[in-house]
Amino acid sequence: METKSEALATFKNFKVLAENEVGRSVKVLRTDRGGGFNSKEFSDFCESNGIRRQLTAAYTPQQNGVCERRNCTIMNMVRSLMSKSGLPKEFWPEVVNWSVHILNRSPTSLLPDLTPEEAWSGRRPAVDYFRIFGCIAYAHVPDQKRSKLDDKGEKCIFLGVSDQSKAYRLYNPLTKKVIISRDAVFDEASTWSWTEKSGQQIPADFENGEDLTVQNSEGQTSADLEVSRQTAEESLPTEVEFSTGGSLPSTPELESGTELEFGTSSRPQRKKRRPVWLEDYEVTDLPQDDVPVNHFALFVDCDPLTYEEAVKEEKWQKAMAEEIGYIERNQTWELTDLLEGHKTIGVKWIYKTKLKENGTVDKFKARLVTKGYKQEFGIDYQEVFAPVARMDTIRLVFIDQLPGYVKSGSEHKIYRLKKALYGLKQAPRAWYSRIDAYFLKEGFQKCPYEHTLYIKFGDGGKLIIVCLYVDDLIYTGNDFGMLEKFKQSMKLEFEMTDLGLLHYFLGLEVVQSDSRIFVCQKKYVQEVLDRFQMKNCNSVTTPVDKGVKLVKDPGGRSVDSKLYKQIVGSLMYLIATRPDIMHGVSLISRYMEHPKELHLQTAKRILRYLCGTADFGLFYKKGDQTVIMLEIWMTEKALLGLFLCWDMVQFHGLQRSTHCDFIHNRSGLCGSNFLCLSSYLVEKNYGRTSAEST
């Protein structure tokens, strides 16, 4: 909006946008008495559309405080960005657009778990395309607009993103034009020197780069686009695909008004070593020049580590109160005096923000645990776990009263545990015995081949299957009445929360319908890619390159074995729903102790494959026939692969040193898996009898 006379047209556009995108109508409009809002046409339009007007009193901006405060925030950000970038004041509309774009994608005090953009659209916005405003960008020049000897890139200034294309807005100070380009390489540590008489064209390498696209306001494609003053916020589509190959190391955007200071000195500088406490952290994308850089680490919404931090926030106070209430209702402890010759075990709080499968906050959990590492074997505990169906006696365990929950008048007393608490060495044994006794009392039968699997059979082929993972349960069955009865029985016996239909369990995302089930680990894949800085990598179509041959390679360049083990371990957890990467993970897992560059590149290729197939998983369809498939890969050593399907029940891969060993173990592996999976069903008449087995 360049003039106030455009206020009515702009408001009409916003009204249509709100109705189309969020399905809500404008009911009340509060403005000042400026000429743009006080015209007869504006009033007639609001009256005809049933919009109630609220006008502030003259010279009383505080009556429209939300808008005025927002304008103050935007202008403070604009001044900081302009000061940092060094742009002339003529660029203020571009700075306003980018400031609003950032603020709409930043958390606020009113929306602690959402951003304004997410609250408006219902989709979590991407921010990986953010760049430091005003930094140097090298835009790709398409082949059609240059000769073989011309530079492949033109030096520009980053102004933001386009609202019509998945591309950046870049300004060329030499031609004084704004261009829209998807392919750009950024140098966020540099800004344009406005004292330069002539610019320097720097060639840039773009692998498989696409054509440079420039669009004007009418949607036409041209080579030039004049700088225009705009005040409307620009937004980028949710899924942004930008070329990052060959880009310079990027620097995180700093808080408004913060600058990096680069000092120069003729004195020799001693090479700094990393502190010991940083050795367990991976440091990547460091600048390759010798200019000293000030590094910053910004943390947002971290879970508190101590009680003193948590007690400052109401959400954690409620979480701790819920935990204490549960412990007291369960009669876990009793207040008493400390017996002579005994000592207390300290306790601590563990705070965790639990997320749903889509990344939104599910609840804030505060868990009270004991400092079990202070227990001594043979004195404070004996056995830590035994899968037997009987209750175990817990030795006398005393703990201190909790900070903030000390009983008035009994400050000198302590708690004696009547039941196990998280953190005790004997807690797993005590809990397993408790839940195991309950299942047996309710008529469940424990699977002899998997001691956390319980099955209860009813009349007419009815059954219910329960799988136990510590204190989390998942269950299924073929009779709704049995399921409801089990759920009510559990609620009477234990204080539990019914989470409804299974959607997310131990990193597994489950989508269910009447006859189909789809299981994947998309969220976990994205976390793994982000952890190893592979989120924006170029994807590939196969997990292992064709013809690759991994060997020990004693002459190869060694890589960080700790990083390599972390990658392999993360990939191994994915095999449960991604059998397509099993062979590749099997290959790279053989070189854990002394990995070389070749092994790391192979592991990263699997990550690149996952980047393009993050939503792949296992699809189970009701009524599919049992399929057995055996595949064998032959190298210098025989590889045995077993792929056993009751719609994907088990899959294994083994390597044998000799062909004879391979032949010997082939039938053994298949037979043992068949027996393990089928024998329990056979016992309960859910499979062949032993006489029919072959």
Image (cartoon, rainbow, N blue to C red):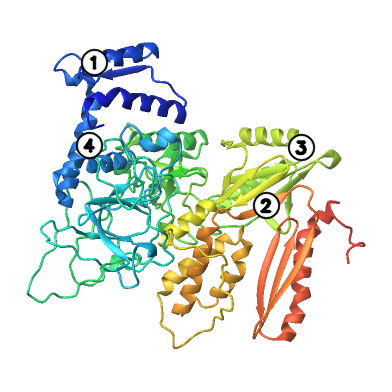
Label annotation for residue 479: 3
Q: Amino acid at mark 1?
A: Asn
Residue situated in front as seen by the camera: 554 or 565: 554
**Nearer to us: label 1 or label 3:** 1
> Quick one: label 1 or label 3, which is nearer the N terminus?
1
> Quick one: label 3 or label 2, which is nearer the N terminus?
3
Question: Which residue was labeled with disc 2?
Answer: 619
How far separated are the C-alphas under marks 4 and 1?
A: 25 Å
Residue 80: x, y in percent? Answer: 17, 45
How far separated are the C-alphas under marks 4 and 2?
A: 49 Å
Residue 230: x, y in percent? Answer: 26, 38
Q: Amino acid at mark 4?
A: Ile
Question: Which residue was labeled with disc 1?
Answer: 38
Q: Label 3: few (<14), some or many (≥20) within 10 Å?
A: few
Q: At 32% from the left edge and 68% from the top edge, which residue is drawn?
A: 279
The local secondary structure at tag 2 comes to strand
The local secondary structure at tag 4 comes to helix
Q: Amino acid at mark 2?
A: Phe
